[in-house]
Image: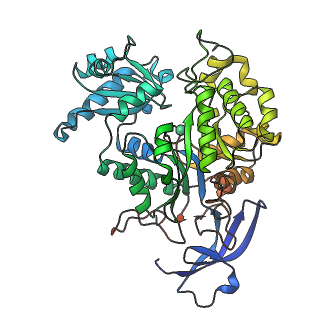
Amino acid sequence: MNSDRVLFKNANVFDPYTGNWKKKDLYVESGIVRPSFCCKEPQEVVDLKYSWVIPGFTDSHCHLIGLGSKLRSLDLSRYNDLEGMFSEIKAWIDKDKDDKRDFYLFRGWDDQRLGRSPTKHDIKKWLGENVKIVLVRYCGHVGVASESLCRKFGITDPDGMVSEDELNGILDSFPRTKTELKQDFIEGVKEALKYGVTCVHSEDYHRCGLNDLIELLKDQTMIRVFEKLHLNLDEIHGLKNIFGVLSSFSTVGSVKLYIDGSLGGRTAYLSEAYEDAPTKGRLNITPKELEKYALLANKLGVQLSLHAIGDAALDVALNTLWKYPQRVKSRLIHLQVTRKDQLEKLPHLNAHFSVQPHFWASDLEMAKKRIGKRMKTSYAFRKMYMWGARRMSFSSDAPVEPVDPRFAIESAMKMGFSWEESVALHTMTAAEVAGPYFSKRLGRLEPGYLADFVVYEKDPRSLPEPSMVFVNGKIPTLIKGGDRSVGSR
Ligand SMILES: [Zn+2]
C-alpha cells in the first residue's frame, strides 16, 4: 500500500476524546486524516469491514534502543536461580567468541526471583577472572560489575555493586557502534509497532554518540519519536540547537533528569527510611543543581522530564517546579511512592504525569517490603486521576516492562480505570505530553490528525493483538528495500 490518497471504508473508530465508537470511513491523504468530503478520487480503497480501529498508542516513557538491545541479547529476567542464569550467560559468551567483543552487557535480573543479587564473586566463579561484564538489574538503576571492571573504574563495593552515575560511567565507556545502535533501534521499533505503539517518548542517549543518535532519528520514518535526552548542564549549554523538529517522524524536545533511582534497588529517595533497610535511598541531583536545569530549560523553551520514584524525590521536583514555573509544561515520570499531601497538590501543578500502571502489578510484593504502610497512598494513580491530575498518561518504561500497551491497560483496569479511560491515557493524553509537537496531531482520528492507527479483527476491549498497524496511513516497512512489515500477519 503506497498510495497517497487512501479511503479506509467501513471502519468502527474509537475516539478517546468522547469515549465513543463511530462507524465511518477514514480518508487519508499524504498520511493525514482528511474530511470525507475531500475524498474525490482515492488511489486505493481498503474495506475494513467494520473492524475496530483505535488511534495508535503513544508510550509516554520508554527506552526504544534499550528495548531493542534487550531483545537482541540474553534477557536475564527469565531466570529463577543464579546457576541457571550464569550457565546461560557463559554459553552466550562462548558462542559469541568470534566477535572479538571485549565487553558484555546483559540486563533484567531480579534479586527477588534469584533469591539474592549476583555479585562480582559469582561472575569470577562462573565466567573467569578477566571478563569485562556488567549485569544490570531489571530496573536499569543498579548493576554488578566484574572484578576487572571494578579495578579499572575504582569501584569499592565488596560485591561489585554499582548504581546510577557509577553504573552509567562504566556503560558509557563501552559505547555501541553505529551499526549496533541502528540494529537495536530497529528491533525496538519492530516490537513497539507489533503491539500498536506508533509513537514513543523515548530516552536513548545512553552508550552511544549523541550525533549518531540524532542522525539515526533524523533518517528514520518508521515510528514517531519524541526524544528525551539525558544531558548534563555543560552539554545543554553547548548543544542548544539540538532541540526541535528533526522530521515529521522525530523530534528532540526534552531534557530528562533522574532525581532518584529505583525502589527495588533501594535508591529511590524516601522521606522516611525503608522498612527493610536503614537508608532513605539517594538523591541524584541537589535542589540547587535542579534549579539550574529549570532556569536553563525555561530559557531554551525545552521540556523538563523528571524521574521521581520516592516521595522525597517528588518533593524536590515539586518545590523546584513551583519556584520556577516552566514555559513548556514539565513531565514528572513514575510517581510511585507518594503521600496524601502530594496527591492533593499534583492537580494544581502545571505538569504532565507519566505513570506505569504495570509497575504496580510487578512491584507489589517487593514494594510492600520496602515501604510497608506507605503503600496505602503509593502507586495511587487512580486516586491521582480522580482527585484531578487529569494530565496523566500511561507508559511502559520498556525495557523495564513490556512495551505492549495491554499490560498497562490490564493493570490500570484492575486499579479502577475503565478500558476507555485507559486507552485515552495511552493515546490522546499521552500524545499531549509532547507539548506543541504531537498534541492535536496524534491520539485521535479526526481531520488534521496524523493517520497512525491500529486495526483489530476482534473487539479490542477483550485485549487481543492488533491485526494491522498503520503509520502515516501506511503499513510500515521495517527493513529498507525488504518486504517485512508489521500488521500483515
Ligand atoms: Zn525509564
Q: How many marks?
A: 0
In the image, 183: left or right of 464? Answer: left
Q: In this orientation, does residue 142 appear?
A: no
Query: In this picture, is 456 found above or below 191?
Result: below
| Residue drawn at 32 percent across, 43 percent down | 176
Q: Residue furthest left?
A: 98
Instruction: Please identify the residue farthest to the bottom as the structure is shown.
Output: 41
Residue nearest the observer in this picture, 414 or 215: 215
The foreground one among 489 and 453 is: 453
Residue at (16% x, 40% y) in the render? 98
Instruction: Indicate the colouring scheme.
Output: rainbow
Q: Quadrant of residue 54?
A: bottom right
Residue 274 in the image: state x and y as whole percent. 63, 15
**In front: 43, or 438?**
438
Name the foreground residue: 75 vs 169.
169
Q: Is residue 400 left or right of residue 167?
A: right
Instruction: Give the quarter of the image for residue 33.
Output: bottom right
Residue 19 x %, y % = 77, 59
The answer to whether any part of residue 38 appears in the image is yes
| Placement of 254 over or under 16, stated as above or below | above
Q: Left or right: where does residue 336 sit relative to residue 177? A: right
Where residue 113 appears, as percent x and y from the top left, is 48, 23
Q: Is residue 340 left or right of residue 81?
A: right
Q: How far from the left and from the top, in percent, is residue 384? A: 77, 38
